[in-house]
Amino acid sequence: MIKRDKWHFLSTQVGYDKHTVPIFEASARNKCVPLLKTLMSSHCHNNCKFCSFRNGRETIRERWEPSELAKVTMYLWKKGKIQGIFLSSSVEKDPDFVVEKEIETIRILRKSGFTAYSHLRLMPSVSRELIKQSVEIADRVGINLEFPKAEYYNDMKIFLDFKQDIIKRLRWTAEEIKKIQKEEKCKAGLDSQIIVGASDETDKEIIEVSDWLNSRLNARRVYYSRFEPIKNTPLENKEPETPLREYRLYQSSFLLRDYDFEAKDFVFDDNDRLNLSQDPKYQIAKKKELIVDINETEFDELIKIPGIGLKTAQKIIENRPIKDASKLKSLGVILKRASPFIDINKIHQTTLSKWIN
């Protein structure tokens, strides 16, 4: 089953002004976390081909003032409607102008007693000083990578330089986070987002850049947003990307982040795409012909086996020796996925029928 974060809209009465604001039901560690997710401004001078707020498109434009947005956020938080705020923006005027507004909003909230989660999406080419201020005040800070390589970026983004405006700023953000974490000043983390299917990017390229974000920049999470065409944009006639591709990339990302896999471990077809019909973890195990002894294998190898997660691997270690399949099942192992890759009592479990005895 493919689970996607959900939106719903909540009408609120704040002072004399009525606001309709988006409440975003984000999924985190199998929990639903309602966030106020909004743009600081939808006015933009960029002309990204895929974006509904591109400069060349006629659409309704709105903007928040920091004090107004902070007031609405505090109201929703106190009413128990949200557990945090996710704040992004289009690029109005210049990147620093936008990010200053974002930071000001969070500062007003903190001074008002807001202790909930705050997530800032910074603008490409923002100054390092504002990156520093952002990671000092927010719980999560990110800059959208959007595409895995400059060749795709140049085709989609008109006014930005991939290496200077994006990659350099992501490095700066990681460095500033590391610096203040050493000083124990905050708990800020880095994340980013990649659009899937707007250009001709491959799964291999996406997984490689996701691996770089995780291993080199210590990203907390990489988000994937499947492309859907928008009317009156240059890509309005392009086919939408399938939800399944987005789902397989999320699975791959969690393998990179939580299970110590590397980009080189993944299995791709001749077009550098994942096999969407199979779990990428299963594909890797099959390619490597993994066989582990359930009673002797260390944690780092147990978690490489399909059907065994982080918590299940720890339970297996704590309950050894394991004598039969029923015990594994009771510990949470998904036998259908795991059976081809494990031994019990030196017996290779190649078929499910052997597990029932």
Image (cartoon, grey):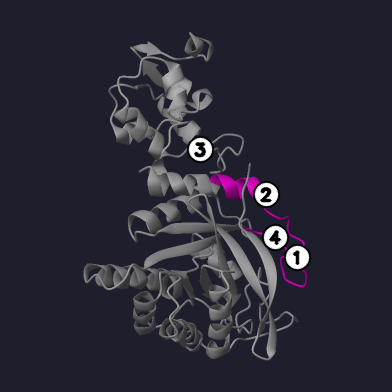
Judged from the image, the secondary structure of the residue bearing numbered disc 3 is helix
Residue 273 in the figure: left or right of residue 133: right
Q: Which numbered disc, 2 or 4, marks the residue that appears first in the sequence?
A: 4
Three-letter code for the amino acid on which mark 2 is drawn: Thr
Task: Check the image and name the residue furthest to the left.
Answer: 183
Residue corresponding to mark 4: 228
Magenta-tinted stretch: 226-248
The structure residue drawn at horizontal position 34% and vertical position 35%, both measured from the top left corner, is 314
Look at the image and say whether residue 120 sits in the magenta stretch. Answer: no
Residue corresponding to mark 3: 280
Three-letter code for the amino acid on which mark 4 is drawn: Glu
Query: Looking at the picture, does residue 206 appear above or below residue 133?
Result: above
Q: CA distance from mark 2 to mark 4?
A: 9 Å
Q: Nearer the viewer, mark 4 or mark 1?
A: 4
Residue corresponding to mark 1: 236
Q: CA distance from mark 2 to mark 1?
A: 16 Å
The structure residue drawn at horizontal position 42% and vertical position 20%, both measured from the top left corner, is 327
Within 10 Å of disc 2 (Cα), the crowding (few <14, some 14-19, many 20+) is few
Number of numbered callouts drawn: 4
Residue 134 in the figure: left or right of residue 320: right
Judged from the image, the secondary structure of the residue bearing numbered disc 1 is loop
Q: CA distance from mark 1 to mark 3?
A: 31 Å
Look at the image and say whether residue 242 sits in the magenta stretch. Answer: yes
Q: Which numbered disc, 4 or 1, marks the residue that appears first in the sequence?
A: 4
Q: Position of residue 335 (x, y in %)?
A: 50, 23
Residue corresponding to mark 2: 242
Three-letter code for the amino acid on which mark 1 is drawn: Glu
Q: CA distance from mark 3 to mark 4?
A: 24 Å
Q: Position of residue 81 (x, y in %)?
A: 59, 69
